[in-house]
Amino acid sequence: MRPMRGILYKLCSVMTFIVMAALIKATADHVPPGEAVFFRSFFAMPVIVIWLAMRKELTTGLRASAPMGHIWRGVVGTMAMGLGFAGLAYLPLPEVTAIGYAAPLLTVIFAAMFLGEDVRLFRISAVVLGLIGVLIVLSPRLSVVPGPGNDAATLGAMLVLGGAVFAALAQVFVRKLVMTEKTPAIVFYFSLTASVLSLVTLPFGWVIPAPREALLLVLAGLLGGVGQILLTSSYREADASVVAPFDYASMIFALGIGYWVFDEVPTLTMLGGASLVVTAGVLIIWRERKLGLERAKQRKAMTPQG
């Protein structure tokens, strides 16, 4: 294990995914979200295949033992991606990022509901704290005052929140898949499934992107593949509990790109709510690490017979 290298890979992956989201946002006014999903997914696959070939893991890395599991994960994950991309057209990048932080909180709830995971008072309290933060971020977008701007912002907030719900469900499927599948297979077959499913939206208004838009979309797909590789590499080099908190560095990157590229100035309400969500997420990660260390000590103390 090389934790510092793992942290570096994680930070690079977070930065890569934020840049990818910014590229999608730059085309969102003209390119439908379903089309953006296709570019993001299709052009990620060559990057993943080349990486596996370089590691001589192409045959073993793409072997699927649970094809239906990959399909269901792909369906749910594609919904999450499509809703998130749609929301980028209506909301600032930092706000989309903050609302997206609801996904790991909801994963705790869904894992308890569908996987029977034990969730105790500490994690429940942290989830409640985080969801309060999400509501604070959402509050300006839930205005009862009618108007084109308010309506668009409300729609965007609901789209991104819906994307977070589906992203959390996707994580539940991933938790089941990792029991039998290799990580490269999960990543590759998700991109493949998303590419195919995105074609269903063809009759609903795909456009021929301008050369600049096409370049940005292809680059977003390539960066998506690179981001997945960096993310996978980070977990090879360090424990999940070490690198997971660095997910929240995405807010710093989103604030910078939002300000300098899109002229988006964050509000105090958004920053306050995001701070609560980040605090809740870090508390959950800290608790998971502590429980993991306690379980490891218990296993070491057990006799060979258990």
Image (cartoon, rainbow, N blue to C red):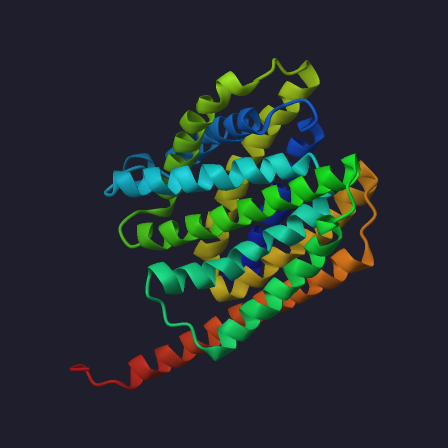
In terms of depth relative to the viewer, which is nearer, 279 or 42? 279
In terms of depth relative to the viewer, which is nearer, 95 or 236? 95
| Quadrant placement of the N terminus | bottom left
Residue 103 image point, x, y percent? 53, 54
**Can you see residue 5?**
no
**Can you see residue 191?**
yes
Residue 191 image point, x, y percent? 43, 34
Residue 274 image point, x, y percent? 69, 60
Quick check: 282 left or right of 258? Answer: left
In terms of depth relative to the viewer, which is nearer, 88 or 140? 140
Image point 58% across, 40% down: which residue?
Answer: 84
177 up-or-down from 188: above or below:
below
Image point 54% across, 35% down: which residue?
Answer: 82
Residue 15 image point, x, y percent? 64, 46
Choose top left, top right, bottom left or bottom right for residue 218: top right
Quick check: 49 left or right of 161? Answer: left
Image point 32% across, 53% down: which residue?
Answer: 176
In terms of depth relative to the viewer, which is nearer, 121 or 67? 121
| Quadrant placement of the C terminus | bottom left
Number of numbered tags placed on the structure image: 0
52 up-or-down from 254: above or below:
above
